[in-house]
Image: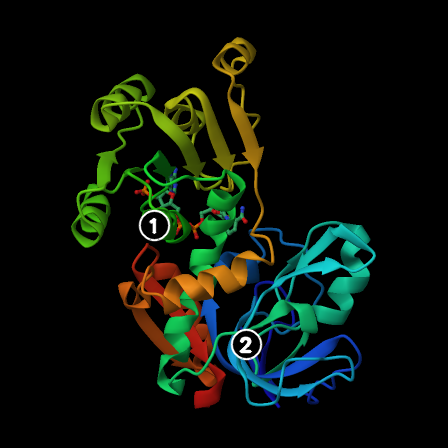
Amino acid sequence: MKAAVLNAFGETLKIETLPDPTPGAGSVAIDVAAAGVTAYAANVFNGSRNYRLELPAVPGPGGIGRVRSVGPDATRLQPGDWVFCEPTIRARDEASNQILQGWTYRTDAALPLHRLYRNGSYAEQMMVPTENVTRIGEIDPKDAGRWCGLSRLLVPYGGLWAGDLKASETLLVSGATGGFGGAGVAVALAMGAGQVVATGRNAQTLDDLAVRFGPRVVPVPMTGDEAADRGAIAKAAGGPIDMVLDFLPREASLGQVHANLMAVRHGGRIILMGGVRAELGLDYNWLMHGEITMRGVWMYPPQAVPRMVQMVRSGLIDLGQFDLAEFPLDEANAAVAYAAANAGPRQLTVIRPDKG
Ligand SMILES: NC(=O)c1ccc[n+]([C@@H]2O[C@H](COP(=O)([O-])OP(=O)(O)OC[C@H]3O[C@@H](n4cnc5c(N)ncnc54)[C@H](OP(=O)(O)O)[C@@H]3O)[C@@H](O)[C@H]2O)c1
């Protein structure tokens, strides 16, 4: 099979011929149709993100494809099924040892898993643990790229799931102008949020969100002045904020983080999903007297996947919301560069290994 291989950090992806994967018990071989490319993939490949990833590897965290063959223990999956392949793999003997297939491993304890599944979806075929493969029903092959939107939507869904967002609640999404934050706005609305306060520095992207998703979205441009930003959020929300979903990246300042987190109401919930590396420095007394629940969330539970498929199938989520840019596998490096130059809630960059 043909695959895009990263041989060393800082090198471009090389298109190489590798042996076809052969699934044993507990795994499935997939003919990959489409695989998403994140805005920060370039930084993973150039090494600046310092991701734990043993090389050489075929990158690519999950995607959409058809089952090619199944291991002897599969009970439902059939060759030809259209499926979503979920990249978060949890060790069967210790669920906290996790990797993202084709992307990174979290701790050394997860290395055996990474060594088995470090090759991901930027290839014509990949091997995936059986439990990471979810049937999505019949689709038109030309829509496979659009269905990669599931990967984008599922991440914030994991946070909203963990925070138990309820219909009619007010949610604040910080980093709403980014890929995952913007998806968080869409998912929260689909879950019945009464109001979504969307914050970010890019006023134009915020306005675009409000135009696309309607009056339940309240855009609040951030200036970087913490006090002013807190005031603007309070004024725009016009009432208590039940939950904050934070997707600020590692470049964000603590002032940016605080302005958003501290907007939460007494008894509210804060879900941290962004890339900030700093000590949070939140006031003990504010947390305690405010009876705030704060929780970090990485990715999403496996049960979220079929639910998200249903949200799409039922029309609650429109995959048409994405501006799709598709690249054949041979142009994987162009896809990575395009994704880096076109970050944002609308953009969805996809590699199509089924298109050569
Ligand atoms: N927890 C998880 O499971 C999980 C999963 C995937 C990704 N993540 C993390 O989520 C974060 C967001 O990812 P993404 O793909 O949505 O990123 P992205 O598309 O680059 O969006 C990040 C947003 O942050 C905003 N931002 C605020 N302050 C910034 C600053 N000082 N420098 C640069 N941007 C700034 C930018 O919007 P403005 O310019 O409008 O402010 C940008 O739109 C990443 O850090 C990633 O590691 C977490």
In the depicted structure, whether residue 275 falls above or below residue 353: above
Determine the secondary structure under disc 2.
loop
Q: Where does label 2 land, which residue?
A: 122
Residue 293 lies left or right of residue 208; in this view the side is right
For the residue carrying disc 2, how many other residues have a C-alpha within 10 Å: few (<14), some (14-19), or many (20+)?
many
The residue closer to the viewer here, 54 or 289, is: 289
For the point 70% across and 89% down, the residue is 19
**Is the residue under label 1 in contact with that under label 2 (CB below 8 Å)?**
no
User: Which quadrant of the structure image shows residue 78?
Assistant: bottom right
Specify the amino acid type for callout 2: Tyr
Q: Which callout, 2 or 1, points at the residue further toward the start of the chain?
A: 2
Q: CA distance from mark 2 to mark 1?
A: 25 Å
Determine the secondary structure under disc 1.
helix
Q: Position of residue 222 (x, y in %)?
A: 27, 32
Q: Position of residue 267 (x, y in %)?
A: 47, 20
Question: CB of residue at label 2: within 8 Å of ligand 1?
Answer: no
User: Which quadrant of the structure image shows residue 58?
Assistant: bottom right
Mark nearest the camera among 2 and 1 is 1
Q: Which mark is residue 47?
A: none
Q: Is residue 52 visible?
A: yes
Q: Which mark is residue 182?
A: 1
Question: CB of residue at label 1: within 8 Å of ligand 1?
Answer: yes
For the point 45% across and 26% down, the residue is 254
